[in-house]
Image (cartoon, helix red, strand yellow):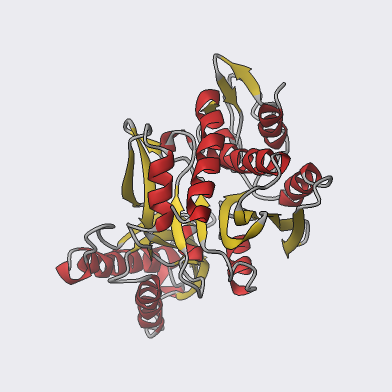
């Protein structure tokens, strides 16, 4: 099997399901162990979960071009036609959890760097691979790299999430923020024949959900908070759990929700709205006491639409119908937008967006192979200043 296909297959076979990224990082480091021009560094975020930086130095000084991919995948689930962690190839497709989201993008970057290293790294500047942990839940790895100053000298970053959609290849320059939160409610249990002796946590939750969603809907419908690229801030209450049995007043409840934010009403303001609603509820002693826990807070990201990196990408992919678009979801763009320097950012990678997290996830091998070429050409154009 060709090297670039073997790399993708072996990455798929490492079951980095919401964990285990250090095994992926060690595999990547081993790929480059015999190259003097390459430096690798593992940077832990949690025990057993390490980010990795791979740095290929060119023949002359210049800018730094990077491809940043996350090393974790989501759970496989049931009902696969092929085993999800084998990398089965059939009809020009490789099947497996993470083929699309986003080990094909990771493998394309690694294969590109190996090819360039084999060719003598005859370019100006440096090419980096940034491998991050925990993107699927929290994006802690990217946050640690940003806050630790590890990426302060990078000039351009491509994030190779799958961006092919509706017959076009999207170059994403903006994404919504995302707040994942949990609200815990503590009431007082009582027999259901004497409800006046208890405090019903579920009833408190029901009222809280109604009043808080109304407040969010006012934000959503306010034209002052509309972003022409990303739309509006939204909130969804997505989980509610509580109670113990039929004939008891419930003394506990758990509410979970997800707010998607835009810069005009950003994640900080959305968190304030939630906290105010919790504090208002807790002023009433006849209601269950609520506590807000923030599981993830990501800011909306709006990078520049016309940059040297995006121009290089479009030139390298002249045959790809690349359209510059916003993303209504979120990705590590939300972390990299906080880098202190003026850095070009874009999300672009192989695979259909709709295949992410699905059973029988796959990547078309022709597209994967062409992405290696595309990344190589983009790097050369960006680093040469063309």
Residue 133, by quadrant, is bottom right
The N terminus, quarter of image: top right
Q: Is residue 329 visible?
A: no
- Residue 32, horizontal then vertical, whole percent: 78, 46
* Residue farthest toward the right in the current orientation of the protein: 34
* Front residue (pair 130, 308): 308
Residue 120, by quadrant, is top right
- Residue 336, horizontal then vertical, whole percent: 50, 64
- Residue 373, horizontal then vertical, whole percent: 54, 35
* Front residue (pair 22, 78): 22
* Front residue (pair 120, 68): 120
Q: Is residue 244 above or below residue 166?
A: below
- Residue 222 as seen in the image, left or right of residue 234: left
Question: Residue at left 63%, top 68%?
Answer: 144
Question: Residue at left 42%, top 63%?
Answer: 202
Question: Residue at left 76%, top 56%?
Answer: 40
Q: Is residue 304 above or below residue 171?
A: below
Residue 118, by quadrant, is top right
Q: Is residue 237 visible?
A: yes
Q: Is residue 289 above or below residue 332?
A: below
- Residue 234 as seen in the image, left or right of residue 26: left
* Residue farthest toward the left in the current orientation of the protein: 223
- Residue 359, horizontal then vertical, whole percent: 53, 29
Q: Is residue 243 above or below residue 204?
A: above
* Front residue (pair 8, 73): 8
Count of picture labels: 0
């Amino acid at each position: 099997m060709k090297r670039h296909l073997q790399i993708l297959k072996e990455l798929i076979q490492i079951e980095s399901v919401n964990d285990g990224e250090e095994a992926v990082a060690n595999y990547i480091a081993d790929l480059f162990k015999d190259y003097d021009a390459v430096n690798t560094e593992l940077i832990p975020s949690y025990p057993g979960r390490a980010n990795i930086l791979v740095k290929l130095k060119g023949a002359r000084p210049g800018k730094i071009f990077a491809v940043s991919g996350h090393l974790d995948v989501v759970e496989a689930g049931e009902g696969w036609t092929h085993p999800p962690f084998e990398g089965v190839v059939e009809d020009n497709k490789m099947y497996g959890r993470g083929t699309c989201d986003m080990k094909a993008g990771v493998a394309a970057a690694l294969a590109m760097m190996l090819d360039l290293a084999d060719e003598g790294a005859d370019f100006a500047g440096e090419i980096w691979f940034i491998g991050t942990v925990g993107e699927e839940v929290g994006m802690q790895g990217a946050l640690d790299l940003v806050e630790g100053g590890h990426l302060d000298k990078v000039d351009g970053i491509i994030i190779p999430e799958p961006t092919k959609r509706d017959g076009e290849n999207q170059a994403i320059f903006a994404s919504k923020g995302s707040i994942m939160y949990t609200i815990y409610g503590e009431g007082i249990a009582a027999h259901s024949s004497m409800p006046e002796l208890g405090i019903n946590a579920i009833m408190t939750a029901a009222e809280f959900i109604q009043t808080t969603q109304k407040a969010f809907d006012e934000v959503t419908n306010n034209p002052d908070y509309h972003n022409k690229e990303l739309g509006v801030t939204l909130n969804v209450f997505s989980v509610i759990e509580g109670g113990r049995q039929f004939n008891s007043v419930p003394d506990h409840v758990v509410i979970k929700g997800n707010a998607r934010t835009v810069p005009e009403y950003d994640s900080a303001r959305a968190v304030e709205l939630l906290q105010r609603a919790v504090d208002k509820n807790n002023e009433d002693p006849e209601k269950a006491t609520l506590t807000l826990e923030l599981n993830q807070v990501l800011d909306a990201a709006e990078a520049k639409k016309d940059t040297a990196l995006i121009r290089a990408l479009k030139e390298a992919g002249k045959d790809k119908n690349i359209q510059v678009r916003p993303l209504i979801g979120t990705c590590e763009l939300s972390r990299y937008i906080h880098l202190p320097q003026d850095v070009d950012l874009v999300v672009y990678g192989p695979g259909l967006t709709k295949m992410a997290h699905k059973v029988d996830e796959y990547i078309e091998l022709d597209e994967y192979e062409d992405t290696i070429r595309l990344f190589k050409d983009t790097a050369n154009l960006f680093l040469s200043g063309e």
